[in-house]
Amino acid sequence: MQIGKTFKPKLFQIFSLLIFLICLFGTYFYVRARKNYTLSSDDSCSLILGEILASENKLMTKSWYYSTEIRVLGTNVFYSLFFRLTDSWHRVRMLSLISMYFLLAISYFGMGRAFRFKKYFFLSAAVFFIPISDVYYQIVLKGAHYFPAIITSIQVVSFAEFYLRLSGKKKWIFLVFNFIFSILIGLSGARQLLVTYIPLAAAAFLIFLADKKDEYKNWLVFALTDLVGSVIGYEINAQIFSKIYSYETWNNISFSGFDSVRFDEIINGFLFSFGYTPENIFSLEVLLGNAVGILWIFLTAYAIWYVLKHKQRVSSRLYRLSVFTLTLFLIFILFYIFTDAFHHYRYNLPLIIFAFPLTALFLEEVGWKRIICSALYLGLVLAAVVSGILYYKSSWNVDQNEELRKIVDFLVSEGYENGYSSYWRSNIVTEFSNGRIDVWDIIDDSNDQAFLRVKDIDQTYRWLQKVSHDTTHPAGKLFLLFTAGEYGNTIWNFPENNGDENIIYQSQDYVVLGYENYNDMIDHLYPGYDFSFGDNRWLENGMDVDGHRELYAGGVSFGPYQTFWPGTHEVIISGDNLMHAQVSCTADSGVKQIELHSEAQNNDVLRYTFTLDEKTEYMETVVRNLSDDPDETIIIDEIHIRRK
């Protein structure tokens, strides 16, 4: 019996380690095999930024439109590093991913040492590498977007525990180190403030108010020091970096009243993050996933309730972790309920990861029978593993990008190196081409109606793409990549305006147009415009009747405001009684006059030409009725402007 008692814990640890390694390497090889099938533009933009940073040999760049964070220390550090070692985009992604996996594992090992939990360490660590939800797989395990935030949170909370064990000079050196570290983290933006530093300081303050013993006082000193450092970093970000680099700060976020809809979204965000899904609830995968997610939530909530009620029965480190986790969730919920900050349920991911160490430490310390705790936690983790396997099995044959890969192969074979598309395809094309194709993002919407808003193809989407795209045009052969729905819904009306002659690839889902150069594309997209009448817009002292425009004595027809590219253009106005008309073309709200050359003038047709040396925006054609006779009404049937 003694021998059995001696070896049972070791066998449990070995089995737990085996589960951890299976989850770690199983997920890595799954992502490696299937990443191209579910790759998103968000995933690919990080690699493009990494390649830019590597080529410029910088940590930050003015050459990129960031999002709401500049990510001084983030995934870009790994991508940039490995782009210096290889030019294979696939190799860069996978080397970076496995590096971040191991960094997370090492950071979590430090947390295990900090909070001194051993028995369930490997089991709880395994959960980090299980697709507990689709959003967790897409954003964390595959996309790696939140690894920096998760690792930072784990590190900061662990450092706080290590700090309590130090004394003398080591304590001060460690505090200074963390102060500098928090400044560096704050440089990236405000998100880490919300999900780490503010909750940690708030939790430390609440505990100190309840019990002013030295241990809690030291924890408060550490938390406040880190908070000050992160605020300093954020102020540098908001006041200095924001004027140098292109990204959106959180400075414009405002307080708002309680919104029950947003509250529901946030709570649902936690449910979805833990793996709950309301669809196909009777399938085995969904049933198991929902059960596991609800159990994680229940066990986490119960652990926090138990610790707060019986804090004398548990260690002070479990007490601190429980209060921090509760404070973290409450501050996050309150922030998004009472502000107008945009919320997406993926934002909940850096919070839910604390459920795994918290429940592991709780079950190690509670006074229940060990066999019950071991069976409970092992069963929950194994259920999560099975749920993850079912998720991988069901998504194995999902290929969202099969045709995009074919299109990229075709474009590369035909010598296309530049093109235009919407955001949700552009960056993927660049990665699939191993960086050989540069794509200008011109719209961000993912619906088929998006291109109806693209008035000017040079007005790029200033978000997660190169800044140079906003000021330069593609060189050489170029393409326009659309989904079939986008192609059928643009301001250019391709099906009606001879779009077929430029099609180089077409299928049920995609259409690609090809051009020899930028000017050929502009000639095709913007040959001019036809001014249609019918809504009395841009009209003074006149009326639109049956598709015609009547201008009374002294009346003016102006607009619409259009963009024209360099070249010679022809203006044709047809109608009746046009000899009383004065025609002019202006830009910039009439400030800039465009010189017109008369080609023909009679009562039925007025014909002019004008030449532009540069791109001109907000141009309008102004027609005035100069007659003083109330009976002299000008009739305008059509106004055409065409590139000659």
Image: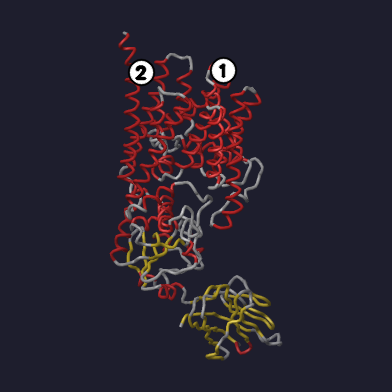
Q: Secondary structure at mark 1?
A: loop
Position in image of residue 346 (x %, y %) = 48, 42
Q: Is residue 59 depicted above or below 524 in this figure?
A: above
Left or right: residue 292 compared with residue 345: left
Amino acid type at circle 1 is: His
Q: Residue at x 37, y 71 (%)?
A: 476
Residue bearing mark 1: 310
In the rendered image, which quarter is residue 636 located in?
A: bottom right
Position in image of residue 550 (x %, y %) = 62, 79
Residue bearing mark 2: 9
Task: In this rendered view, identify the residue nearer to me: 633 or 396.
Answer: 396
Amino acid type at circle 2 is: Pro
In the rendered image, which quarter is residue 576 located in?
A: bottom right
Q: Secondary structure at mark 2?
A: helix
Q: Is residue 182 depicted above or below 320 in this figure?
A: below
Position in image of residue 19 (x %, y %) = 33, 29
> In the rendered view of the protein, which quadrant contains the N terminus?
top left
* Residue closest to the far front: 169
Position in image of residue 333 (x %, y %) = 58, 37
